[in-house]
Image (cartoon, rainbow, N blue to C red):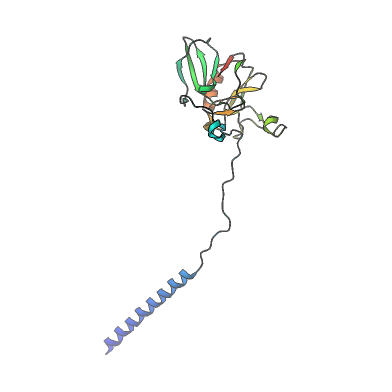
Amino acid sequence: MALVLRRTAIFVMIVMMWALLAAAMAHAQAQPVERSSTVQQTPPAHSPNVDFQAALPPQQAQPQSAPVPQSPSIVPLAGYRPGTIVVKTSDRRLYYVLKGDKAWEFPVGVGKQGWAWFGRAAVEAKYIKPAWQAPPELHRGSYGPVIEGGSPRNPMGVAALTLRKGEYAIHGTNNPKSIGGFVSHGCIRMYNKDITKLYAMVSVGTPVIVEK
């Protein structure tokens, strides 16, 4: 008799535990899920170095020629005096001419449609970490605020060689993805490591030839 009562009590306890567990699960499923009312968004980036090639409609995009090299190398190049900088705009390449019909070849970003220029110039000044100020044509008719040299927002990069009374420059960039494109307002844009190398090789007065 005692054994029967003990088994009955155990059975009743098991049934009660299952009932309590089922009630708890039903209550949890009935609770609404809380959601945050604030959606975290990454703020948009506004860079002075916009890739103009990507922004153009397809029919206006600049024609692409051979792939632009990603690192400098020495290549054959004849017809120029040693010590001359040659920019081939359509190829997006800059050459620093060496003796023996050879030259250092660098990938560059060049002037976008309507802003590219061609002709001869000379390096007029050399600057390390130059400050930059947006000209009126880029800043609603007035000069923009000065961006100090070395700032990650500075589109001139780590160094600059100025041309034509400062109207143009061969310079570094804070937007390395733009190298190899038609992206600037006439300046010649280089990787920071490449402008550092070129800066060390040239001097004030170095001739510059910009070709189509």
**Res. 29 visible in picture:** yes
The C terminus is located in which quarter? top right
Residue displayed at 53% across by 34% down? 58
Say how many tags the image has. Answer: 0
Q: Nearer the viewer, residue 186 or 206?
A: 186
**In the figure, is residue 139 to the left or right of 69?**
right
The N terminus is located in which quarter? bottom left
Residue 56's spot in the image, x, y percent? Answer: 56, 34
Q: Is residue 171 above or below residue 139?
A: above
The image quarter in which residue 24 lies: bottom left
Q: Is residue 111 above or below residue 74?
A: below
Residue 145's spot in the image, x, y percent? Answer: 69, 34
**In the figure, is residue 138 to the left or right of 71?**
right
Residue 10's spot in the image, x, y percent? Answer: 32, 81
Residue displayed at 35% across by 82% down? 12
* Outermost residue, bottom side: 1
Q: Nearer the viewer, residue 194 or 182?
A: 182
Residue displayed at 65% across by 29% down? 132
* Outermost residue, front side: 59
* Outermost residue, right side: 142
The image quarter in which residue 117 lies: top right
Q: Nearer the viewer, residue 40 or 5?
A: 40
Q: Is residue 147 above or below residue 211?
A: below
**Res. 174 visible in picture:** no
